[in-house]
Image (cartoon, rainbow, N blue to C red):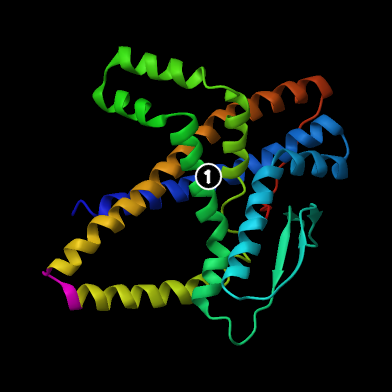
Amino acid sequence: MNDPWMPFLAAAVALLLLVFLQRWIHAHLHGVSLLLTGRAELALVVYAVILFPGVLLHEASHWLSATLLGVRTGSVSLLPRRQPDGTLQLGYVEYYRGRTLDPLRESLIGGAPLIAGTAIILLIGYRVFGVTNLAEAVQAGDINALAGAMGELLATPAFALWLYLLFAVANAMLPSKSDRHAWPAFLLWLAGLTVVVAFATRGNAVFNNLAGPVATFFGYIAVALYIAIAVDILFMALIAAAEWLLSRARGMSVVYGGQVNEQ
């Protein structure tokens, strides 16, 4: 297996894992809100407020990308509402799918929250938490350096606030079902273009020059996704503990179905 493929595979695996983690978090965070309030509609408000920074970034990304790409937008909402099929919608941006809206632009609009969320996670990870030092310590296997890096991480000013922002962004940045509307056509177009380019440039400097930047790009995506996974695992433990304590205190538990929450 060629090395240039490794960042892409790492990002793909991380994305799939993050999808499963987000499903669990959305369901159980809503469950904790329900146990805490005892009222379904109030629980929805609490649940939405917790994820509000991420929802705001999600919808702002849709609106900004649509505007920059020349697509007319309609109403915007950041208020949660329950859909007829039982799913929870935390917000939405309307844009008009006319005949001139091609799969490429629609896919970019739908994928904008993932791009923006990845950028924010990398920015917080590198600029605020300094994960570079932690990664180097883990790679070197130096216990003292690892302890020092962890100490620096925990000593970050407003550590809890930044950690919460990472959590909110990570759990609202994945594209919803409606966001993925044009992805099949776009991915088919992209796959065809990739095959043509790879065939036309095989064995020459053009292909070799492209491989490095593409691998770097997917490498950064993978780093952001694995930071999100680490944060999610931490918050999953906190959510599970809160749910257990509230269930014991109220003498009831939440029964979960298979519904999916959309941004």
Q: Position of residue 257 (x, y in %)?
A: 70, 48
- Say if residue 228 shows up in the picture: no
Residue found at the far bottom of this picture: 99
Q: Badge 1 local density, few (<14 within 10 Å), some, or many (20+)? A: some
Q: In front here: 152 or 202?
A: 152
Q: Is residue 203 magenta?
A: yes
Please identify the dominant SS of the magenta region: loop
Magenta highlight range: 200-204
Q: Which residue is mark 1?
A: 120
Q: Residue 251, relative to residue 256: is it above or below?
A: above
Image quarter of residue 44 = top right
Along the line of sight, which residue is nearer the eye, 71 or 225? 71
Identify the residue shown where x is 80% and y is 29%.
252
**Looking at numbered disc 1 in the image, what kind of residue is underneath it?**
Ile
Q: Is the residue 5 above or below the residue 140 in the image? A: below
Left or right: where 76 falls relative to 162: right
